[in-house]
Image (spheres, helix red, strand yellow):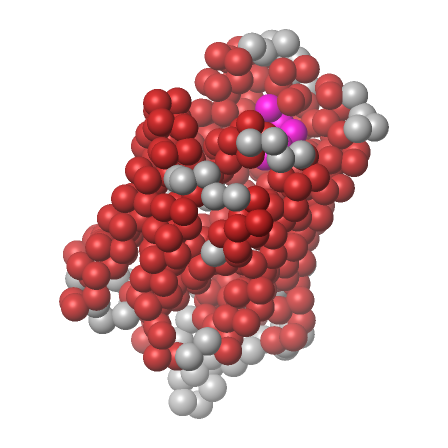
């Protein structure tokens, strides 16, 4: 396996050792140019989100087809977030300490594939729970490692959106295409689609080029705890987690509510797709956004859009308004995500990029678990009015952004 860098204690690999006369790193011979890097990274995000787009709706169906009841399915689905909480900070910190974000990412992707193969060969609640828990160990760090790799390789964070949009495009394609295959396949065979998507993702990871070496000033070891002492950093972690967590009731119960309101499956599918399309449009245009807006400005826009969106949803809006509310997904999710990524790129030293992403995913996992539980209670007790609770969660996220803003150096 090709390594990104030396880890400080060993001799540098030949392809990362050369420096120019002024000490700046020189691109190794044969390393792909920027256009090739952009294309390969876009391919990886597309493949990875095909896996997500197939796993999310169809894995619970496969579990049910293998005889698990609702309680057992809930336990199995709860295992990966629990594993993520403990695994992500360790793996991302290891990747930074060893200066090997790409090798660790590739290793985790291939180990994820092995985990899915093991799941496909399992039967019974105990065996499936064990294999899913083991698979979650390498799966959990994939997204923070991928984001850290992208931010470092792209250098200009404004290019992150145009790359990331291919993940959203492929998610829609996978959801639609997977739905067509779902009508043709036995439920017990759905795991084959997931394994196939994992294999495609693993292959695409091999095409990711090695990263250029850190500049000499970026190779200075910085304690990971420095991030947690940085002004505003922790506030931003909670801000992003709260704004994104405010989507919990929408993710969990909007389809149920829309069906109860008489909307058919085609209309509901259109509404979900419309929200993701709005996200894609923002990602595509992100490089053209005014630089003065800044990461924190984007996050405040995301918090405001989420507050407006959930407040409107609480009062059972008529069907003709729903597309407009779904278009706000481009801001409530997309602007928040872009702002968070931009802030972390500014706030974290380059040799702590993966660690910063790991901290974000740990806090986000904890907050998401809480908001998912809260959304179930709110919807059960108040129906659509429960969205008002989500609006308050978004407001809390916006206040965290404001709390960080005066002290932020990013």
The residue that appears at 64% across and 22% down in the rendered structure is: 61
Residue 299, by quadrant, is: bottom left
User: Does the stretch in magenta take in 59?
Assistant: yes
Part of the protein shown in magenta: 56-60
Prevailing SS of the magenta stretch:
helix
Residue 255, by quadrant, is: top right
Which sits in the foreground, 18 or 109?
109
Q: As drawn, is 117 to the left or to the right of 155?
A: right
Q: As drawn, is 121 to the left or to the right of 316?
A: right
The residue that appears at 76% across and 23% down in the rendered structure is: 189
List x then y, in percent, for residue 150: 51, 62
List x then y, in percent, for residue 297: 33, 68
User: Does the stretch in magenta take in 7?
Assistant: no
Residue at the limit of the structure toward the right, as seen here = 184
List x then y, in percent, for residue 265: 67, 34
Which sits in the foreground, 273 or 24?
273
List x then y, in percent, for residue 45: 61, 55
User: Does residue 128 lie above or below 111 as drawn?
Assistant: above
Residue 182, by quadrant, is: top right
């Amino acid at each position: 396996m090709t390594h990104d860098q030396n880890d400080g204690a060993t001799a540098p690999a030949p392809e990362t050792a050369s420096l120019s006369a002024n000490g700046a790193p020189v691109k190794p011979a044969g390393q792909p140019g920027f256009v090739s890097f952009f294309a390969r990274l876009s391919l990886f995000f597309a493949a990875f989100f095909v896996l997500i787009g197939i796993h999310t709706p169809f894995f619970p169906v496969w579990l049910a087809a293998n005889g698990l009841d609702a309680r057992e399915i809930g336990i199995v689905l709860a295992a990966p977030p629990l594993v993520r909480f403990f695994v992500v900070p360790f793996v991302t910190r290891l990747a930074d300490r060893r200066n090997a974000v790409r090798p660790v990412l590739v290793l985790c992707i291939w180990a994820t594939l092995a985990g899915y193969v093991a799941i496909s060969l399992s039967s019974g609640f105990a065996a499936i729970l064990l294999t899913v828990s083991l698979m979650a160990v390498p799966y959990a760090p994939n997204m923070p490692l991928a984001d850290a790799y992208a931010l470092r390789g792209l250098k200009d964070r404004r290019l992150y959106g145009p790359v990331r949009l291919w993940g959203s495009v492929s998610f829609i394609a996978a959801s639609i295409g997977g739905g067509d295959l779902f009508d043709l396949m036995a439920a017990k065979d759905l795991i084959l689609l997931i394994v196939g998507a994992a294999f495609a993702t693993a292959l695409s990871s091999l095409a990711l080029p090695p990263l250029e070496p850190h500049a000499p000033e970026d190779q200075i070891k910085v304690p990971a705890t420095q991030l947690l002492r940085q002004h505003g950093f922790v506030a931003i972690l909670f801000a992003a987690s709260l704004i994104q967590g405010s989507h919990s009731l929408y993710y969990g119960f909007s389809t149920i509510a829309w069906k109860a309101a008489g909307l058919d499956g085609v209309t509901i599918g259109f509404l979900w797709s419309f929200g993701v399309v709005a996200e894609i449009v923002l990602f595509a245009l992100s490089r053209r956004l005014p630089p003065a807006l800044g990461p924190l400005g984007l996050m405040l826009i995301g918090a405001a859009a989420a507050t407006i969106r959930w407040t409107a949803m609480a009062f059972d809006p008529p069907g003709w308004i729903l597309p407009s509310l779904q278009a706000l997904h481009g801001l409530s999710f997309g602007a928040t995500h872009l702002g968070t990524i931009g802030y972390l790129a500014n706030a974290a030293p380059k040799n702590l990029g993966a660690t910063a992403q790991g901290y974000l995913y740990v806090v986000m996992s904890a907050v998401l678990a809480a908001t998912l539980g809260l959304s179930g209670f709110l919807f059960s007790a108040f129906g659509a009015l429960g969205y008002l609770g989500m609006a308050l969660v978004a407001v809390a996220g916006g206040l965290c952004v404001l709390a960080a803003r005066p002290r932020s150096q990013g």
